[in-house]
Amino acid sequence: MIKIIFCDMDGTLLTSENKLPAGFDEMIAELKRRNIIFAPASGRQFFSLIRSFEKYRDDFLFLAENGTLVIYKDKEIFSSPIGFDAARKVLAVSEDFKNILRVYCGKKDAYLLREQDIPVFQAELEKYYTHNSLVDSFDEIEDIPLKIAFFDVTSNAKKNIYDKLAPFYDSLQVVLSSDKWVDVMSPNINKGEAVKNIQRVMNFKPEECAAFGDYLNDCEMIQAVGYGFAMANAHPDLKKVAKYETLSNDQAGVLVGIRRLLDL
């Protein structure tokens, strides 16, 4: 019996127009009747997830910032900060990255340099980091850092960001979250490790858990559950590790997959 469903947001649950699929509320009502928890699992900050699901704030389990922060019923289940020293080293190395937005993702807020407050980045900030502040220097921030996020407006994040952060591959978790975003986190955390922590804390067995994803940062999450679904539009490498496949995000693939689970 399924007890919890972890679900990525962008490219998975949300359509290409950044909307929830038709029939989502009805499906959530059915999950509630069956005492199945729905858990958005995203690189987005907690505040962004809450804005999307305000009416479900007391129902959903929120796996935010690529697994570095988990909140359930407004209580922190656990967190895995990157640490101040590591965050500063990553930010120092990335000072010369061109046309890249750097975001210091703290527990209380997301921070970007005042000089980076330019229109080309606003749409992405509005989507992923709705709760943000401008600072003159990252050194002045006292908020505990969960991760450092990078955005490439040219959609070539692997070349322009990920590859340049190679010196940190062995000491930190450097994740290509999409063709635009790269996240740098604690070496001991990812969505999959977050799922395992949740399983331990809430006494869920892997076979009682399902997950849906579309990109490389979902691989460990898909492998940590008994029912891992890759979207039809998923990265080929994610499809290789997923046991199941469903329709694309624009075809309400998550809802189709959940119906399959409910019929088991």
Image (tube, helix red, strand yellow):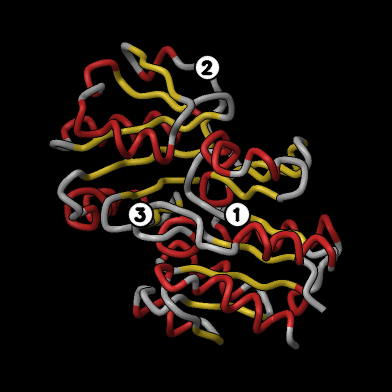
User: Which image quadrant for residue 209?
Assistant: bottom right
* Left or right: 27 in relation to 58: left
* Left or right: 228 in relation to 78: left
Label 1, label 2: how many angstroms apart (C-alpha)? Answer: 28 Å
Q: Is residue 246 above or below residue 100?
A: below
The amino acid pointed to by label 2 is Glu
Residue 76 percent coordinates (x, y): 74, 38
Residue highlighted by disc 3: 17
Sequence-first disc among 3 and 2: 3
Q: Is residue 181 above or below residue 92?
A: below
Within 10 Å of disc 2 (Cα), the crowding (few <14, some 14-19, many 20+) is: few
Quadrant that contains the C terminus: bottom right
Question: Residue at left 49%, top 65%?
Answer: 218
Q: Is residue 117 above or below residue 79?
A: above
Q: Are marks 1 and 3 in contact (CB under 8 Å)?
A: no
Residue highlighted by disc 1: 40
Label 3, label 2: how many angstroms apart (C-alpha)? Answer: 36 Å
Label 1, label 3: how many angstroms apart (C-alpha)? Answer: 18 Å
**Comparing marks 1 and 2, which lies closer to the viewer?**
1
**Comparing marks 1 and 3, which lies closer to the viewer?**
3
Q: Nearer the viewer, residue 94 or 222?
A: 222
- Residue 138 in view, yes or no: yes
Quadrant that contains the N terminus: bottom right
Q: Nearer the viewer, residue 158 or 208?
A: 208
Residue 119 percent coordinates (x, y): 21, 27
Q: Nearer the viewer, residue 192 or 259?
A: 259
Q: Nearer the viewer, residue 86 or 22?
A: 22
The amino acid pointed to by label 1 is Pro
User: Which image quadrant for residue 228?
Assistant: bottom right
* Left or right: 76 in relation to 159: right
Sequence-first disc among 1 and 2: 1
